[in-house]
Image (tube, helix red, strand yellow):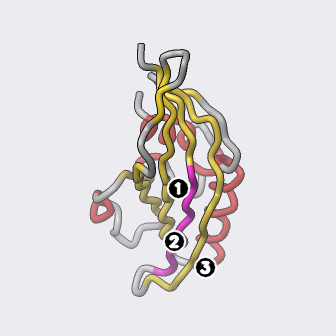
Amino acid sequence: MSLERGIHQRWKENYLLTRRVPNQRFITGRAAHLVRDGNGSWVVLKLIPEHENTRTSSSGILGSVLCEFEIHAPSLDEAQAIGTETLRCFHRADFPFQGGRTMDMKLVKQSGESDEPHGWKQSMCFRVRIEIDDA
């Protein structure tokens, strides 16, 4: 399981998130057109490698990734509520994924804007420090 799948799994296991945005409406990258149907909220996950990886003395690799959650909702209140739950679930999170683990997820940037005609868009960007097993 990759970091992306680990994030999806964490989302799927969080009832407060999935009751607002079901797992099938939490998508990765360029698939947003698949859920832009006017039938509720959706979230797009984007991962952007940030720095070169560093090898550790214990045969692991440390890296840093920017992880953006792009929240789309029909109302400002709903976008903010999804953002609040996303923050609770992921800010300062430390969780394993197959082949590694996150060491820390830190919110570094947040913004919101009107997303006519679909409602509102809120973006939350986290810096994720990861450790990858190189065995």
Q: What is the three-letter code of the residue carrying label 3?
A: Leu
Which residue matches tag 1? 21
For marks 3 and 1, the one nearer the N-term is 1
Whether residue 54 is situated above or below residue 98 in the rendered picture: below
Whether residue 48 is situated above or below residue 96 in the rendered picture: below
Q: What is the three-letter code of the residue carrying label 2?
A: Ala
Name the foreground residue: 78 vs 131: 131
Residue drawn at point x = 42 percent, y = 59 percent:
44
Residue drawn at point x = 48 percent, y = 17 percent:
59
**Spatial CA span between label 3 and label 2:** 7 Å
**Spatial CA span between label 3 and label 1:** 15 Å
Which residue matches tag 2? 73
Marks 3 and 2: CB-CB under 8 Å?
yes
**Spatial CA span between label 1 and label 2:** 9 Å
Could you say which disc has been placed on residue 76 in the image? 3
Q: Which residues are magenta?
A: 119-127
Marks 3 and 1: CB-CB under 8 Å?
no
Which image quadrant for residue 104? top right
Residue drawn at point x = 42 percent, y = 67 percent:
39
Q: Is residue 64 left or right of residue 27?
A: right
Q: Position of residue 112 (x, y in %)?
A: 56, 78
Which image quadrant for residue 30? bottom left
Q: Position of residue 66 (x, y in %)?
A: 49, 53
Q: Is residue 97 left or right of residue 17?
A: left
